[in-house]
């Protein structure tokens, strides 16, 4: 996964799609935001979670994670976590245990081709419904966030035809499985099995070429997700 998503629907739509009562969801940021058709790492998209007192919550959380010791060693900020290592590796295992979250999205971008001639592709569900990307976070609501606060999206190897676009993809769950992923009482071993076994397959998605205007993160318009000719 190259690291660019879209969140162009109101947050209430994501809450209802997940089966949450939108009127009962807590958030430290209650204002709505403009649609985002080109959301890069380093920004703060919506993140859904239940690890704070078991409450359904949605907040704008920074996309990226780097603990202080990694910063001191010059290790780059992580934006994704490979499912093969995230549950047990030193870098992410504490987040896997107590920081499981969902990043709602309408789709994501990948790129093919040589440097300087990169062709962007947009990937969305065939139903064009909101999708729920598994994430893990180092985040505490209602507090000033530390330098290392943020989330990463969990990724797995691509399969079927999607591998022609990119060899990695976000782990996307159906709403009922996303609810289970968010359950703070779900043991981390079962959470790993859930993410591996229930990730939506390539057949659930469409992917097509889009405008190279996506390549500039400052561009943000609905036409960015419209298909272009090969």
Image: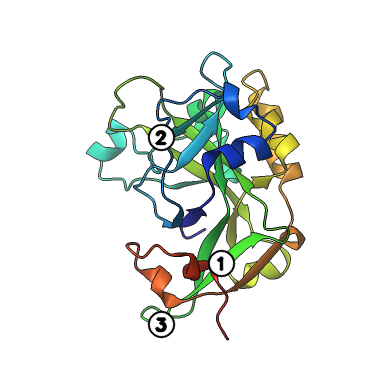
What residue is shown at x 63% (from left), y 48% (from top)? 131
Q: Earlier in the sequence, mark 2 or mark 3?
A: 2
Question: Where 58 sits versus 206, above or below?
Answer: above
Can residue 90 be seen by looking at this rendering? no
Residue pushed farthest top?
53
Q: Which residue is mark 3?
A: 117
Mark-to-mark CA distance, 3 and 1 = 16 Å
The picture places residue 157, in percent across and down from the top left corner, at 63, 56
Question: Where 230 sits versus 14, above or below?
Answer: below
Which element carries disc 1, helix, strand or loop?
strand
When asked about the image quadrant of residue 114, the answer is bottom left
When asked about the image quadrant of residue 160, the answer is bottom right
Q: Earlier in the sequence, mark 3 or mark 1?
A: 3
Question: Where 46 sits versus 107, above or below?
Answer: above
Mark 1 packing: few (<14 Cα in 10 Å), some, or many (20+)?
Answer: many
Mark-to-mark CA distance, 2 and 3 = 39 Å
What residue is shown at x 31% (from left), y 27% (from top)? 145
- Label annotation for residue 122: 1
Mark-to-mark CA distance, 1 and 2 = 28 Å
Numbered disc in front, either 3 or 1: 1
Q: Which residue is mark 2?
A: 31
Residue pushed farthest left?
72
Can residue 144 be seen by looking at this rendering? yes
Mark 2 packing: few (<14 Cα in 10 Å), some, or many (20+)?
Answer: few
The picture places residue 133, in percent across and down from the top left corner, at 59, 45
Q: Are marks 2 and 3 in contact (CB under 8 Å)?
A: no
Mark 3 packing: few (<14 Cα in 10 Å), some, or many (20+)?
Answer: few
The picture places residue 121, in percent across and down from the top left corner, at 54, 71
Q: Earlier in the sequence, mark 1 or mark 2?
A: 2
In the drawing, does residue 210 fall left or right of residue 145? right
Residue pushed farthest bottom?
230
């Amino acid at each position: 996964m190259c690291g660019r998503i879209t969140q162009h629907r109101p947050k209430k739509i994501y809450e209802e799609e997940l089966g949450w009562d939108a009127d009962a969801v807590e958030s430290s940021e209650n204002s709505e935001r403009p649609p985002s058709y080109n959301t890069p790492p380093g920004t703060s998209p919506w993140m859904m979670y239940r690890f704070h007192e078991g409450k359904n919550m949605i907040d704008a959380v920074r996309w990226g994670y780097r603990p202080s010791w990694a910063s001191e060693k010059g290790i780059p900020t992580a934006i994704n976590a490979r499912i093969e290592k995230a549950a047990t590796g030193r870098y992410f295992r504490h987040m896997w245990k107590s920081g499981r979250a969902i990043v709602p999205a309408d789709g994501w971008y990948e790129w093919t081709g040589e440097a300087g001639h990169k062709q962007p592709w947009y990937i969305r569900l065939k139903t064009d419904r909101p999708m729920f990307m598994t994430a893990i976070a180092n985040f505490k609501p209602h507090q000033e966030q530390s330098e290392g606060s943020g989330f990463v999206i969990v990724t797995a190897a691509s399969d079927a035809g999607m591998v022609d676009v990119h060899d990695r993809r976000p782990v996307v769950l159906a709403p009922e499985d996303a609810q289970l992923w968010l359950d703070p009482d779900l043991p981390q071993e079962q959470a790993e099995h859930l993410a591996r076994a229930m990730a939506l397959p390539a057949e659930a998605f469409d992917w097509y070429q889009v405008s190279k205007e996506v390549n500039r993160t400052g561009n943000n318009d609905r036409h960015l997700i419209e298909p272009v000719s090969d």
